[in-house]
Structure formats: structure tokens, C-alpha cells
Image (cartoon, rainbow, N blue to C red):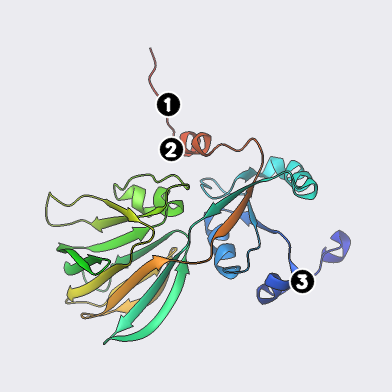
Amino acid sequence: MAETLGAEYLPVESFATQVDVALALGGDGTVLYTARALHGSGIPIMGINLGSLGFLTSVGDTEMSSALDAIANQSCKISERDVAECRIFKDGTLAGGKSSLNDMVLGWGASSRIVTLKLSIDGESVGSFMCDGMMVSTPTGSTGHSLSAGGPILHPGVSGFGINVICPHTLGSRPLVVPNTSLIEIEVVNAAKELILSIDGQDEFKVERGGRIEICRSPHQVKFLQLQNHSYFSVLAQKLHWRGSSF
């Protein structure tokens, strides 16, 4: 089939030097995988929706021909999205790090018992929360897990991060939006279990009591290609089934 189409197989590692545009055919998970694989390369991504939800995919499967023409004619719109960098510390030592286009969620684990997490912004303590976990989302990820947890929808043009405490044991805790210039720190103050840090839906690291997570804006953005008639608010209305008022 590849020979018939005039295509050739390339390992993902070589995309940065041999690819001009990446087409992500699938759903949001495929787009997130593509963005991670191309992180820092500057290669634009066009998401082709072959699934059902598809907040990150801007082109339907019936529009593929028009999309290819738009790419060839260089008539696409470009949407630049912020990416977060997440670093994990264990006993004060850097244990690893990943980039995130969508969100970073600290929680779950082998027990249902609650944990205590301390949140700090730019070195200033915000508070300690008895909860099930905490998540930090980019504007792109605000329509994902964060939205399900009651967080606000952040337009991609907003320069900020959303912070949600998951099932806090207080009625006073509410979602928080901070500038994307902030350094966000989450410390596991008390936990009778090992927590899991999930980045863009992938379980990446195990975090124990005393562990600390730092989150800041990445110097690299992700570029999405969109057709000229693409509307962010139309996508929201369609995917979230907004109907508005009727009389």
C-alpha cells in the first residue's frame, strides 16, 4: 500500500529533520502523541478526526481533500498552543521530566485514602489541601479532565494555567487560574499510598510522600494547522452540546 501511495516509512525520531507537516489521523490521543513526539521541532500538526470527540482535531474525515489542498496552497490558519514542562523531584533530586500539551494529574494510587498536597506559586504558599489529588492544565487541556472536574474553559489565547484540586475535603476550594509565567509547585505532604502522576493521559511517574513536582511554561509551543473556516467556539458548541436559549 505504501508503494502504491508513493509513501515511505519513517521512524518518529527522524520526523524533526524530514517532515514539513504532520497529519495526526485519529482522535485527541493521537494528536497528543504526535505533539509529544515532535516537541521542540516546530513542525505544525493538523489533526484529522476519525473518532467521536476530537477537541484537538480541527478537520473531519470528509474534509481531508480540502485540508491537503490548503496545506499545499499554504492557506491554513496557524494556532500556537502553550506547552508545560513538568519536573519530578524525589528526596530533593531531579527524578525525571516530561512536556505536556494537555494536563498533569497527580492522584489515584493503590488506596482510596486521601492525601495532603501543598500548593505553592512562585515560592509563595497557596495552601495545603486534603484531597484525592491535584491537576494542572494548559488552555488546550482545559476542555479535558479539568472540565470534568469543574474547572473553567480557557481559550487557547489565554496565557495561563488552570489548577484544580480533585475532591477537596472543604467547600472553600475552587479552581485557580495563574499566569503562564508562574512556577507551580506541588508537594506530597502526607500520603499513605504511592501516587501516580499522569501526563497527557499517560501514567508516567510514581510519587511518594515528600516528593515534589514543578510545573512551568515550556519555551516551545505546538503549532496546529486549521482550515480558514475553523471556529473554536463552534467546536465547543458542537462537542459540549451547547444549545443556548430557545423561546
The residue lying at 34 percent from left, 60 percent from top is: 136
In the figure, is residue 247 to the left or right of 19?
left
48, above or below 204, in the image: above
Mark number, residue 17:
none
The three-letter amino acid code for the residue at tag 1 is: Arg
Quadrant containing the N terminus is bottom right
Disc 2 residue type?
Leu
Q: Is residue 175 left or right of residue 75?
A: left
- Going by the image, does 185 lie left or right of 86? left
Residues under numbered marks 2 and 3 in contact, where contact means CB atoms less than 8 Å apart: no
Mark 1: few, some, or many residues within 10 Å (few <14, many ≥20)? few
SS assignment at label 2: loop
**CA separation in Å, label 1 and label 3:** 44 Å
Residue 171 point in image, percent of width and height: 12, 49
- Badge 2: few (under 14), some or many (20 or more) residues near its Cα, within 10 Å? few
Which secondary structure lies at badge 1? Answer: loop
Q: Is residue 131 visible?
A: yes
Q: Position of residue 114 (x, y in %)?
A: 16, 66
* Residue 186: % across, % down: 26, 69
Marks 1/3 in contact by CB < 8 Å: the verdict is no
Taking depth in this image into account, of 130 and 50 the one nearest to the observer is: 130
Label whose residue precedes the other's in the sequence (2 or 3): 3
Q: Which residue is mark 1?
A: 243
Quadrant assignment for the C terminus? top left
Work out how far the residue at label 1 is from the one at label 2, CA to CA, in angstroms.
9 Å
State the residue position of label 2.
240
